[in-house]
Image (tube, grey):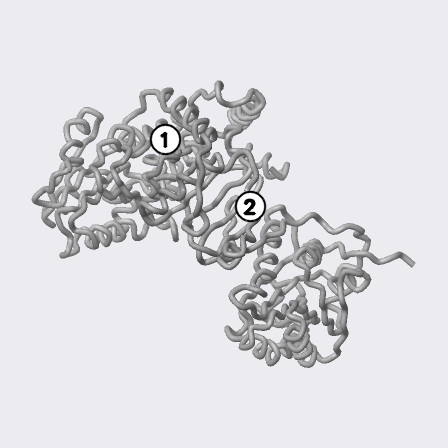
Amino acid sequence: MAQNFYTSEENHQILIALLKAHNIRKIIASPGATNVSLVGSIQKDDFFEMYSSVDERSAGYIACGMAAESGEPVVLSCTGATASRNYYPPLTEAFYRKLPVLAVTSSQHFGRVGTYTPQVTNRFNPPKDVVKFSASIPLLHTQEDTWAANLKINEALLELRRNGGGPVHLNMMTDYSQDFSIKKLPAVNVIRRFESIDLQKDNLPELKVDTVGIFIGAHSKFDDELTRLVDLFCEKYNAVVLTDHTGNYNGKYEINPNLIPATPRKNMNVLIHLGEVSGAYMSFNPGQVWRVNPDGELRDPFKRLKNVFQMSEKEFFGGGGTNLPNYYLAWRRDYDYVYEKIPELPFSNIWIAQHTIKKLPANSVLHLGILNSLRSWNYFEFPKNQNICAYSNTGGFGIDGCMSSFLGASLASPDKLFFGVIGDLAFFYDMNATGNRHLNNNFRLMLVNNGTGVEMHIYPNGTRIVFQEGSEPFFEARGNFAKQSKTLLKNYVETLGFEYISASSKEEYLANYERFMTPEKLDKPLFFEIFINPDDESDALKLISEIDVSEIVPASMRVKKNLKRTVKNVIGVKNARKLKKMLGR
């Protein structure tokens, strides 16, 4: 008879490996067929302390007593059908007593829920006062599946002890694999959470590495004290702050890496992650990520999350030092090198940003529409020490409320100047905001009107590259909204009480933009409409994305990048994507 080891089902392998990594030993199993993958894998593993209970309701209450007495988390395992329903009473008890009980319910394929397949019940939304957290873990087929399962199971196990503790639910899919030949569990990423109490006990992980990056997503304005603490941290740990305009950090060690291509500089040891959703699409390759936020949630856009610090940023960054921040200086050299090599760009949102951003008045606020406006203006730096803040609707990342968010901000601080840069589709979607009766003269809107919704047209993935010219009427929005009419919005906003100016070329723009950027209050809100050829917008992005960086990028990386470009040129973008999918890359 073959000797049994661990199941071949990778989702269960990850669960078992993480239970061991988080030192969770006590298991109460109820008999059944659907949970054999889990129970059959752990019953001969000496790490676990196994108990049997035929009645799931009784098993749940046994777990409550065991968790209360031992202070340790206890795992429940049951089969399909109504077995998990019997956990409701004891899990309710655990919820109100904050007892760390993990209910692992086993399920057939999730697609069978609601199809009248025998013994399949819906476990996706347990009552709010039964468990603190619930997740369903499918069978795994891709690297993305594996990463997501690893993250969710870590989240579940950490929640058992978080904020006083409580019960948690994992719903594990199985295909009833009878293969128990796996002798070694996979390597897993173990995520730890640290709270303010750990800071007081000096129980935080040490940061003994060569290179540290601090990445800031969308963030409220940094106050002087937090800025000072971050700057001191950079000096002590050889760190650099990497962010776009919406990060709103104005300290000494900021680099906006949007202009800098993939370089070895991005292979840092630790990346400290602050703020919320970023619209900058920055890519890094850190050894590990430390997330700092008072909510303590697991946010992992870089797929390297290692530690979560549930505390204020000021608590985390407290301290400092006097070391020379060489890592920052290296990033600064890269940025300055690339900036000097920017060629003459066609008339575009990027060109406008390049020639305008340094003119933003001190203490003003910039609102950027997603996606093209945010990307274009992120290539260039704000004037230093001018206390300028920037925002963009990167939370839901939709075009539907850019104008209204901009309006609301301008109403909240009538003494400040507010500048908005937005595309035509986003404007027309939310144009009713310009008719709001509360709008006042601190509101200045720059409308970049390309007549098409340029994101669907633009380099490197736009429809004009994949499809022949003129064959994209439903991918783009060309032809709507009066086809870049020179009078439609002029008449509209002037009727609403705006001052209106416009430009269709670099010369016209340079003749008008200083009025738009003047630090003096005007008598009326100001509307600046700029007419752009979408092909020029795409060409500008191509030019700035393909700047020669041979002096800062190793030959091996240049060869790989050039090879990708050659393949796309030879076989086409569409076929290149198919090849990439076939190769699993």
- Counting the numbered discs, the total is 2
| Residue 42 sits above or below residue 406 on the image | below
Q: Which residue is mark 1?
A: 538
Residue 283 in sight here: no
Q: Secondary structure at mark 1?
A: helix
At 67% from the left and 67% from the top, the residue drawn is 106
Front-lying residue, 254 or 551: 254
| Residue 33 sits above or below residue 55 on the image | above
Picture quarter with the C terminus: top right
- In the rendered image, residue 453, in percent from the top left (x then y), is placed at 33, 41
**Within 10 angstroms of label 1, few (less than 14), some, or many (20 or more) residues?**
many
Mark 2 → mark 1, Cα distance in angstroms: 30 Å
At 60% from the left and 56% from the top, the residue drawn is 154
| Residue 83 sits above or below residue 143 on the image | below
Q: Which residue is mark 2?
A: 303
Front-lying residue, 545 or 49: 49
